[in-house]
Image (cartoon, rainbow, N blue to C red):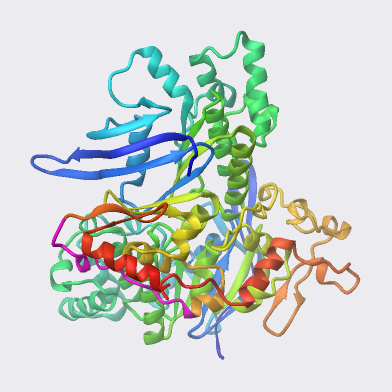
């Protein structure tokens, strides 16, 4: 791919200390790139470190080690207030729970305008209000909604407010951490369609974190699968679903129930046994096919290659 | 098949400061022995309230306004609270969504399982303990002798849900109500729990009412499916009826809004708008304002249940003989056809 890299993550680690001598390696050395205009999906079970990865990338957590480069600049490391402000404007986040990520005592107008205020994007109150009203319309709400409080909205509408807030500072890159998990199926489709439309209109790049694999497959161009703080496989979304290589990816894919009773009657679940791996050496993240990466030891790598060729 | 449970025209309302919220507005269905009925719908459609009404576990503001709940011919609505206590956990039991909040954090899980056995089956503590060990083994918890003396926080989410299932199954209930039992769990754990529930159902022959909004799960577990919208069942049929021959526009919308693994770049079929406010249920078909196929009559009169086949009923005027012939939206049609040619190719072949 000769596309422009927006984000480069290199051997990123985030460890949390859990009392004396205990270290939780939530993210333990992940590397990937995200290209301009694409949607990169990050999937994994709870506890796999996918949310921690997202939060570390946007500097909500300080990285233990490793590097995150955004538009050629290091995200972590010392920054002046001005530099930080510039960075914050270009990268924004949408959170999972739309009710706890909106301040219940602020009006929608103030919630969305907060970023506009911080970055002095509006000259006066009329312009500020106008911008917010425009944003509300972009996300499918009315300008009358601006004076209301978050509790007056349904879950789907609140998530739209969260999206409008993220868009207010005109970012290039948005991290969406399980943005639709808390929503009903019919509303999920509305929000996903909205995110896709915004991407087309504004050339946004997304990091989409979720555990709902069918939705991730639908929205993402490329997908990374996380397990226990490590990326175990990374590929174009079709490639990942058609030719999964890592046994964990296979088990994850085989566990998704699909809305198709006939298929469901025959679906065979593959269970993942972490102890079945080759333990003779440390596994590494290797490219098995152009653009298709898998975490494997040398021996496993050869085996996986053979498996792929047979197919 | 024998009818185990018959729900007839059940209406449940809640008194609130703003007035009466009509959460369930006339729901009727049967449940046969040993079968799994899935109830699907959005939040606020009344699916959980229906199940709570069956157990008579409604919050104090809620009340059963009308209707009958016949368990083997006996009307549960007429039972006193004391009589219900003898039925709950014995004839009907429940698995809740969140296993952390449905277990008592200060009680060892062994005692929580034994509680029902001692109360309902007059077992001694020793007998109950023996049975509890069996149950833990049955739901696939390793080292039951150790685990029985542990507290809920020492279990993972999936293991906790297994404990909740063990409690629910303790007295071999005739009806098991599972209210989103896997929604809080990861896909791989979800798959395990669903398999467990199916295995156990085969063993003890309970009927299961499975409440969920995940159509993938429905396709996996259900024999029959009831689709609820705005406090009513809008379509009911066998799982094949609902997935391969849906008739109600709301069911189309639900099916269309889920991406399949083969879905391409086209937009998802999203149902516009949001569900109605049940303080003032709309006149006519409650789904009409969100329904692109709504007819004029939809805003005036509620559609009755039309019969599609012996097993399949749907409440939409589109099935009336005078109604124009309307096909489901393109994406839903494609999906139905795609399904007919059986699922996706398997990755591991």
Which span of residues is magenta-colored? A266-281
Quadrant position of the C terminus of chain A in the picture = bottom left
Q: Residue B324 in the image: state x and y as whole percent.
A: 89, 67
Left or right: B329, with A82 as reference point: right
Q: Nearer the viewer, residue B347 or A165?
A: B347
Vertical arrangement, residue A90 with respect to residue A16, above or below: above
From the viewer's side, name the closer residue of A40 and B252: A40
| Residue most extreme to the right | B322
Please indicate whether residue A257 sits to the left or right of residue A143 in the image.
left
Identify the residue at the far bottom of this view.
B1
Dividing the picture into quarters, in which one does residue B121 lie? bottom left
Image coords of residue A283 (percent x, y): 21, 55
Note whether A54 is above or below A220 in the view shown: above
Q: Is residue A273 magenta?
A: yes
Q: Please identify the quarter of the rendering in which residue A289 is found.
A: bottom left
Q: Residue at x 30, y 38 (%)?
A: A10
- Left or right: residue A53 versus residue A89 is left
For the point 46% across and 70% down, the residue is B177
Residue B64 drawn above or below residue B125: above
- What residue is rendered at 17% in x and 62% in y? B150
> For this view, does A261 lie left or right of residue B198?
right
The answer to which quarter of the image holds residue B330 is bottom right
Q: Main secondary structure of the magenta part?
A: loop
């Amino acid at each position: 791919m000769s596309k422009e890299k927006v984000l480069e993550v290199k051997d990123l680690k985030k460890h949390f200390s859990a009392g004396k001598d205990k270290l939780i390696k939530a993210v333990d050395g992940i590397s990937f790139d995200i290209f301009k205009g694409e949607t990169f999906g990050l999937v994994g079970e709870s506890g796999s470190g996918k949310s921690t990865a997202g939060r570390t990338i946007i500097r909500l957590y300080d990285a233990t080690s490793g590097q995150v480069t955004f538009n050629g600049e290091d995200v972590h490391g010392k920054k002046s207030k001005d530099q930080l402000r510039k960075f914050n404007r270009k990268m924004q986040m949408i959170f999972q729970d739309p009710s706890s990520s909106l301040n219940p005592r602020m009006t929608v107008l103030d919630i969305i305008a907060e970023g506009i205020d911080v970055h002095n994007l509006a000259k006066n109150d009329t312009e500020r209000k106008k911008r917010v009203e425009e944003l509300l319309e972009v996300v499918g709400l009315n300008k009358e909604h601006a004076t209301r409080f978050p509790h007056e909205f349904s879950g789907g509408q609140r998530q739209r407010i969260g999206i409008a807030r993220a868009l207010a500072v005109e970012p290039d890159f948005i991290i969406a951490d399980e943005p639709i998990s808390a929503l009903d199926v019919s509303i999920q489709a509305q929000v996903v369609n909205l995110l896709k439309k915004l991407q087309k209109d504004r050339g946004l790049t997304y990091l989409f974190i979720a555990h709902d694999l069918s939705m991730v497959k639908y929205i993402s161009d490329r997908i990374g699968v996380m397990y226990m703080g490590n990326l175990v496989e990374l590929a174009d979304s079709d490639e990942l679903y058609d030719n999964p290589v890592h046994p964990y990816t296979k088990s994850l894919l085989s566990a998704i129930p699909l809305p198709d009773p006939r298929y469901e009657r025959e679906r065979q679940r593959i269970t993942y046994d972490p102890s079945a791996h080759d333990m003779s050496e440390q596994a590494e993240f290797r490219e098995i096919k152009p653009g298709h990466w898998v975490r494997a030891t040398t021996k496993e790598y050869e085996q996986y290659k053979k498996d792929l060729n047979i197919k | 098949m024998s009818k185990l449970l018959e729900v007839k025209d059940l209406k449940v309302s809640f008194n609130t400061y703003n007035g009466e919220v009509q959460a369930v507005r006339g729901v009727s269905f049967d449940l046969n022995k040993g079968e799994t009925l899935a109830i699907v719908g959005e939040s606020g459609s009344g699916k959980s309230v229906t199940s709570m009404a069956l157990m008579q576990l409604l919050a104090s503001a809620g009340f059963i306004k009308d209707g009958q709940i016949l368990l083997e011919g006996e009307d549960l609505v007429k039972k006193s609270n004391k009589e219900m206590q003898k039925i709950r956990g014995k004839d009907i039991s429940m698995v809740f969504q969140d296993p952390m909040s449905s277990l008592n954090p200060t009680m060892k899980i062994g005692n929580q399982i034994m509680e029902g056995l001692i109360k309902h089956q007059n077992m001694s503590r020793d007998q109950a303990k023996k049975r509890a060990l069996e149950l833990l083994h049955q739901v696939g918890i390793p080292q039951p002798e150790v685990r029985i003396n542990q507290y809920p926080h020492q279990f993972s989410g999936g293991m906790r849900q297994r404990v909740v299932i063990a409690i629910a199954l303790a007295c071999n209930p005739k009806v098991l109500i599972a209210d989103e039992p896997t929604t809080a769990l990861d896909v791989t754990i979800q798959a395990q729990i669903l398999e467990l529930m199916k295995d156990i159902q085969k063993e003890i022959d309970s009927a299961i009412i499975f409440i969920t909004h995940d159509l993938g799960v429905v396709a996996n577990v259900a024999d029959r499916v009831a689709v609820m919208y705005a406090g009513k069942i809008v379509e009911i049929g066998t799982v094949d009826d609902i997935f391969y021959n849906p008739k109600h526009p709301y069911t189309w919308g639900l099916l269309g809004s889920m991406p399949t693994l083969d879905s391409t770049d086209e937009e998802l079929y999203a149902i516009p708008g949001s569900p109605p406010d049940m303080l003032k249920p709309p006149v006519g078909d409650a789904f009409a304002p969100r329904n692109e196929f709504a007819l004029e009559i939809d805003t005036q009169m509620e559609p009755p249940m039309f019969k599609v086949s012996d097993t399949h009923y749907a409440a939409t005027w589109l099935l009336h003989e005078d109604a124009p012939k309307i096909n489901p939206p393109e994406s839903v049609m494609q999906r139905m056809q795609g399904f007919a040619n059986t699922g996706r190719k398997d990755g591991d072949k």
